[in-house]
Amino acid sequence: MPATNRKKQGRDTAVQGTNDSSVVSKVSAAAQGYFQDDFLQHFVCKVARRAPLINRGYYVRWRAVDHCVRRFLHITENCPRRQILSLGAGFDSLYFRLHADGALEGAVVFEVDFPDVTRRKAALINSNITLEKKCFCLIRPVYVSSSRYRLLGVDVRDESQLEEALGATGMDWAAPTLILSEVVLTYMETQRSDAVIRWAATLLHQSFFVMYEQIHPHDPFGRIMQDHFLKLNSTLHALRQYPDTTAQRHRFLDKGWEQCVCLDMNDFYLGLIPEEERCRVENLEPFDEYEVSCYNRIINNVVVCFCLFIYFLNFSSVPSISPSWSPTVLNVRTVPANLEGLGMASSLMSSGQVLLTGGSSRGGRGTVTRILLRSQEGWRAISVEPSVDLSVRLYHSATSVPGGGTVVYGGRSSPLNPVKGLFKVTPDPVGLPGPGDSEETVKLHVEQIECTGDPPLLRWRHTASIISHQGKDFLFVFGGKNESEAALGGGHFLCLDRWHWTEIPVGGAAPEARHSHSACSYQGGMVVFGGLDRRGVPLGDTVVLRPTERGFCWERIEVQPPPVPRYSHCARVTGDKLVVVGGVWLHADAVPGVVVIDLITSSSVEFGLDTTSVPWPLMLHSFCSELTDSEELLLIGGGGNCFSFGTHFNPQPVTVDLRPVLGWKTSIRPSQTQTPQDQDQII
């Protein structure tokens, strides 16, 4: 066999292997109650339980395809004949589910895949009494045939052979037909997949094409996803030429389709799945991986629906935001210190000394406490001796307190186990190394504080900020989540001189419950931005807790133009500006940069990041940050579990040059009607 043929055969075999992995994941999701499918289990040799993250991802994928199929069958129920053509069907159980539900009146399901795949599927059908009684087996290229089901072993890339095989098995080219392509065409060379799309538009004149495929190859998640499939010898070809919904839409219109509408999984999950069903799904398994959850980042897919589908999808899309973008791009530089971690917390102990607690890394969840120290040569990470044991904790808070030291509060060791206790960490009397010292270890003192009063519920993904009332300092704990609450609201005051949880009058409309937000001390109170609400929807509001004579009052700032909603970001206040960096957006196509909110003029502007000089990909979520001087923001840790493609850790801290940000000014408050172009003229 020529080398080119062997290479092609190897790629085809690798692509076929993705079917085996996919069906195991679908069986796992069904077994955990995400959806009902009694037939998938018959197509796997060994059941394996997947992580909750993967189960959620496959639930949304299953639900999206099932939604489109059911809608097609509903609008064609009065047609004497209708068809479903599934390209690259693999071990999908679609026909058996629809048959059991009695949904195939007047309908025929055609499934097409590689001969080796369909031969294996036919053997499984023939050997299982639950499946075999619904159909009978033949010889290639038709491996299974019944009045409602045809299983064909044909290479989809060979249009003439495909057309001939479908015609011979009874395909009615004039009947209403739903064409399904569930992560199939992208494995073909783009020229071949385009030909399949054009072939379907030419031959099937009353048809709808539903394609479920990956998009956004250039963001950090997309890069890791591509590397994963490249290692499997299953390159995602279509991503290069069709990287987003706009390109996919033009792709189908250019290939002969009359209409096209594209939904990404954010739009589908939030617009077409009822809130009650979303709550049911989110309570099935402990879960705390929101940075790559199925409706925000998992596989970053798109459902592409064509022709008449645009008339009956009936969805409410996620509101779009048009922020004001500055032409200035902020420089990002690497800090030469080997330091990684997700879910860490940081606090600035003194100028050039950053305390880091908790988190997880390649070595797992640990209790190691570290310090980033800026010397004459730059930043370096040094260890703490004796070892400071703050227990295993992630997504906690570490807050610098007046008079010195850091208060460590909250967090969790797992999504079912919140961490108890409040600790104060202070430098040993011997002191920390100075900027010119060369010590590689420091000593810290850790004290567990026994607080009085009525403590708040245990939580993580909260914030804890220093505020002032009647000359006293308080730790104000806001938001978060725990094992039973999707998001927590309200605020809690801890008096720092008596370590007593107390109540202080708070007026105004309190912000809605949230987690993974930011909160920064500001003018004796604090300013809250963003986060995820109880429904899992990102927030983009800015709310200030202002001191009053009796206590505090919440005040919502109507920022114009509205910032892009985000969560798992970091924020710092400098002067009267709130500097928000990173986070997760619903529709981000790159590394989310910096939004600066002027708290006086209630205006905002977004700045992009120049990441060309730092290791790629750079994931700015589940990280921490410190404003180390008036012109530099230090970003530490970050990364995430990228579905089943592996976990990424940012290997080193980075700095962001804030000089362009701090020089930004507005002369007037922008109005509701001003466009981003108008806003650029104000800046």
Image: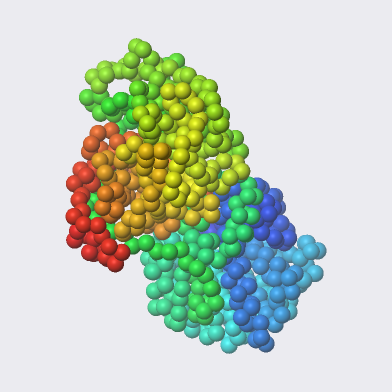
* Residue in the image at 45% along x and 50% along y: 509
Q: In this orientation, which residue lies closer to the viewer: 17 or 364?
A: 364
Viewer-side residue, 532 vs 600:
600
Residue located at (52% from left, 85% from top): 205
Name, please, the residue furthest toward the front.
549
Number of marks drawn: 0
The answer to whether residue 629 is left or right of residue 12 is left
Q: Which residue is more in the foreground, 45 or 180?
A: 180
256, above or below 654, in the image: below
Q: Does the rendering let one see residue 91?
A: yes
Residue lying at the far top in this picture: please name it: 430
x then y, percent, for residue 184: 52, 65
Q: Residue at coordinates 43% horizontally, 64% vertically from top-left?
A: 319
In the drawing, does residue 37 fall left or right of residue 620? right
Residue 512 vertical placement versus 629 (above, below): below
Left or right, residue 99 beside residue 617: right
- Residue 1: x and y in percent read 51, 61
The x and y percentages for residue 152 are: 64, 72
Left or right: 326 with respect to 244?
left
State the residue at coordinates (66%, 75%). Answer: 109
Q: Is residue 148 above or below residue 346?
A: below
* Quarter of the C terminus within the rendering: bottom left
Where is residue 77 shown, x and y percent of the image?
A: 66, 82
